[in-house]
């Protein structure tokens, strides 16, 4: 009888396993992650990502991965502000070695606590530097947190004025925090020149020469580029991306700081 009971018990267990009765399931919740693409800065051919993972309520794991670089040690930091503005280091990460770095974060460098949700709205950007002795060379960079760019954008044409031969576009991109990255891209500019970029009230057709309301970063003649993180107007009035979409204005590129009356290209923005 004992042998029979053992057989019945073994058979019951076997059927339970087959039917999945009593099986332990892995119900660990999927970890929250946010991934940012690392952009080329001072060296070509390097790509990568930085991944923020909510490891726990207080711990965020920050993984930096680079492709196309070398095996050397590259310091990596999170800085205050957007990459266009620049700012001081607020969080030192483990250096990137052999294309990879992982850091568990609970505090900023000033010992103030920071968690995953706070990092998602953080006013910062990531830099990966060439070396501890060459922090000025940045091999990879990306805006993070509230400064990360969304897919929402508006492109405006900047047309030739006064037979200058200079034309291009002004791209307004919305950040997650609602602010705006303005990228001016021109052709026909010359190395050595610096061209003031000004947003004026009114339209090119009906006003022209309207008062200036926002001075953007000047266009570098060598590259034809200008980048500005648009937060406020010159009178410190706060302005966001949605405000700029309905703004009554135009953008003018001037020949130089000494020849502001000579506009080399311009175009309407906002409602114009």
Image (cartoon, helix red, strand yellow):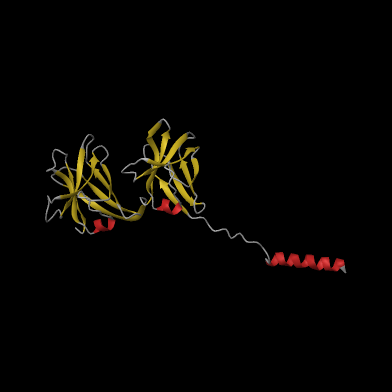
* Left or right: 207 as drawn, with respect to 173: left
Residue that lies at the very extreme toward the front in this rendered image: 111
Quadrant in which the N terminus is drawn: bottom right
Q: Identify whether 10 is placed above or below 64.
A: below
Residue 80 pos. (x, y %): 36, 44
Where residue 132 sits: x, y (%)? 43, 32
From the viewer's side, name the closer residue of 35 and 117.
117
- The total of numbered circles placed on residues is 0
Query: Whole-percent x and y of residue 63?
Result: 48, 45
For residue 43, say whether it is visible: no
Q: Which quadrant is home to the C terminus?
A: bottom left
Seen from the viewer's position, the closer of residues 129 and 256 is 129
Q: Which quarter of the figure has residue 77? A: top left
Is residue 54 or residue 219 the one in the foreground? 54
Q: Residue at x 24, y 53 (%)?
A: 156
Determine which quarter of the picture holds residue 126: top left
Q: Residue furthest top?
A: 133
Q: Residue 141: horizontal and vertical position, in percent?
A: 39, 42
Determine whether, in the image, residue 162 is placed left or right of residue 186. left
Q: Is residue 51 visible?
A: yes
Report the side of 31 relative to 185 (left or right): right
User: Residue at coordinates 79% horizontally, 65% vertically from top-left?
Assistant: 10
């Amino acid at each position: 009888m004992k042998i029979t009971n053992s057989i019945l018990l073994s058979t019951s267990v076997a059927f339970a396993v087959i039917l999945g009765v009593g099986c332990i399931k892995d119900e660990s919740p999927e970890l929250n992650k946010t991934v940012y693409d690392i952009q080329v800065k001072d060296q070509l051919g390097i790509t990568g990502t930085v991944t923020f993972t909510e490891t726990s309520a207080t711990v965020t794991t920050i993984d930096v991965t680079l492709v196309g670089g070398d095996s050397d040690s590259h310091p990596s930091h999170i800085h205050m502000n957007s990459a266009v503005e620049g700012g001081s280091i607020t969080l030192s990460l483990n250096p990137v070695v052999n294309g990879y770095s992982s850091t568990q974060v609970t505090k900023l460098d000033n010992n103030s606590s920071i968690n995953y949700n706070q990092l998602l709205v953080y006013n910062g950007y990531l830099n990966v530097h060439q070396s501890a002795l060459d922090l000025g060379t940045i091999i990879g960079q990306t805006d993070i947190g509230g400064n990360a760019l969304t897919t929402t954008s508006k492109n405006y044409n900047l047309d030739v004025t006064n037979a200058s031969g200079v034309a291009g576009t002004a791209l307004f991109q919305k950040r997650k925090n609602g602010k705006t990255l303005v990228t001016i891209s021109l052709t026909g500019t010359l190395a050595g020149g610096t061209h003031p970029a000004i947003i004026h009230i009114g339209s090119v057709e009906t006003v022209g020469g309207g008062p200036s309301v926002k001075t953007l970063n000047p266009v570098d003649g060598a590259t034809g580029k200008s980048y500005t993180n648009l937060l406020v107007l010159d009178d410190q009035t706060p302005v966001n991306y949605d405000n700029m979409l309905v703004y009554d204005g135009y953008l003018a590129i001037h020949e130089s700081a000494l020849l502001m009356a000579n506009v080399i290209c311009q175009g309407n923005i906002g409602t114009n």
